Amino acid sequence: SQKIEQNSEALNIQEGKTATLTCNYTNYSPAYLQWYRQDPGRGPVFLLLIRENEKEKRKERLKVTFDTTLKQSLFHITASQPADSATYLCALDSGAGSYQLTFGKGTKLSVIP
Amino acid sequence: DVKVTQSSRYLVKRTGEKVFLECVQDMDHENMFWYRQDPGLGLRLIYFSYDVKMKEKGDIPEGYSVSREKKERFSLILESASTNQTSMYLCASSSLGQGRFYEQYFGPGTRLTVT
């Protein structure tokens, strides 16, 4: 069956450092992968989408990589700030022609001043 | 800006009551989704719809039904609420875009408590 794993439930880092979050998947052949941010008591907010034929995507301090051979995506936040503290979710489409996204359980990032 | 609104932020209902959760989006999106989110279980898809009057079951449809009579509105119905349906309910919408759907836009969520 299809499975998505975000390796850490929680990650604590010092302000100014780079946070790296991992998303691994099995039994999928996604066309793209997405990352969302969720603050407590709120709905997720879309951050970045990376397609299967893209290796890397950047947006301001965010960088996402996508390795379809390793079946893994890495999500980096450089020069992290306390305001980056949130839960980050990865999500994959369920395959060609599917309207569904399947979400990982998320990694709760805490940036310590 | 895409806006997805949900009818209530907090809702308390009794066991056996019929519960309606409403979701409205203002960006003419074709696809709409209902999820529930529980600690340790993450986001799980209940139902989705890719067109008016069309619906498809997600991963956990049991105990729920949906209605989409207008493009902008997607309703989730709990026919007879039970305590195990206490959860955060999130609605989302997305655009079809080049034959594949893209990012989802979420509403603020409804925290439902069934007593």
Image (cartoon, coloured by chain):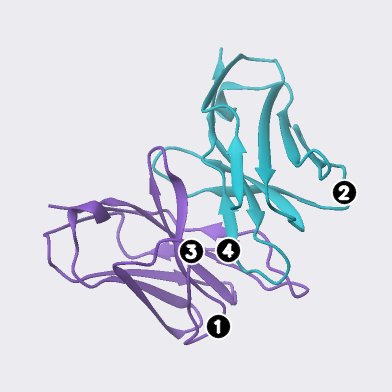
The residue singled out by tag 3 in the image is B4
| Helix, strand or loop under label 3 | strand
A90 vs B70: above or below: above
Task: Say which colour chain A has.
Answer: cyan
Distance from label 1 to label 2 (Cα)? Answer: 30 Å
Distance from label 3 to label 2 (Cα)? Answer: 30 Å
Depth check: give the residue in front, B3 or B15.
Answer: B15
| Helix, strand or loop under label 4 | loop
Q: Mark 1 vs mark 4: which is more N-terminal?
A: 4
Mark 4: give few (<14), some (14-19) or many (20+) Cα within 10 Å: some
Disc 1 vs disc 2: Cβ atoms closer than 8 Å?
no
Chain bearing tag 3 is B
The residue singled out by tag 4 in the image is B2
Dot in front, 1 or 4? 1
Query: Residue at the spot x=58%, y=72% of the render?
Result: B27
Depth check: give the residue in front, B76 or B79.
Answer: B79
| Helix, strand or loop under label 2 | loop
Quarter of the image with the C terminus of chain A in it: top right
Distance from label 3 to label 1 (Cα)? Answer: 17 Å
